[in-house]
Image (cartoon, rainbow, N blue to C red):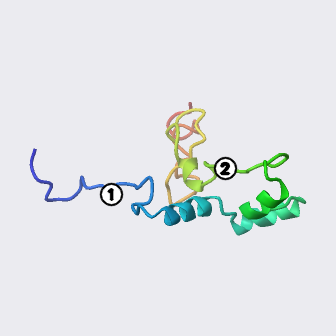
Amino acid sequence: MGVDIRHNKDQKVWRKEHKSQDIYLRLLVKLYRKCVHCRARSRILKAGGKILTFDQLALESPKGRGTVLLSGPRKGREVYRHFGKAPGTPHSHTKPYVCSKGRKFERARGRRASRGYKN
């Protein structure tokens, strides 16, 4: 093993929890994880729902009966469309990373008989 002088193998480690041991700061982090974003808030309110903070929820139903804690879609981000079976292979709906979206780019070979072959 040598020393990595090119720094191409360096990786930043993702922190799973806050480095600080302050219990109040840890509580704040837990609370902000459950914050509702403005888009989600507008959709819930438009559908006739109700959004409460935890202290309001504790006042309304102390034991949590008849309440639902919602979590948004975890794979709702656009980047997840690029993961999966390689684009261009049969039955793959994976989105390729290309700038050009014309007829000749990622849509010709293997997709039409006039351009080499068709799967």
Q: CA distance from mark 1 to mark 2?
A: 26 Å
Q: Position of residue 80 (x, y in %)?
A: 56, 49
Residue sitting at the far right:
48
Q: Quadrant of residue 53?
A: bottom right
Q: Amino acid at mark 1?
A: Lys
Q: Residue at x 65, y 59 (%)?
A: 34
* Marked residue nearer the N-terminal end (1 or 2): 1
- The C terminus is located in which quarter? top right
Question: Which residue occupies the extreme bottom position in the image?
Answer: 38
Instruction: Name the outermost residue toward the top.
Output: 119
From the image, tell me which residue sits under label 1. 12
Name the element at disc 2: loop
Q: Which residue is mark 2?
A: 73
Give 83 or 62, whichever is nearer the viewer: 62
**Residue 117 placement (x, y as % from top left):** 52, 33
Q: Is residue 3 left or right of residue 92?
A: left
Residue placed most toward the observer, 20 or 73: 20
Circles 1 and 2, Cβ within 8 Å, touching? The answer is: no
Q: Is residue 2 above or below residue 102?
A: above
Residue 90 lies, with reference to residue 23, above or below; the image says: above
Q: Quadrant of residue 112?
A: top right
Amino acid at dot 2: Pro
Find residue 20 and report its horizontal and vertical position in percent.
40, 63
Of the pair 118 and 62, the residue shown nearer to us: 62
Q: Is residue 53 visible?
A: no
Name the spot of residue 90 as percent of width and height, x first.
Answer: 57, 32
- Position of 27 with respect to 69 (left or right) is left
Local crowd size for mark 2, using a 10 Å CA cut-off: few (<14), some (14–19), many (≥20): few
Left or right position of 38 against 27: right
Q: Nearer the viewer, residue 55 or 101?
A: 55
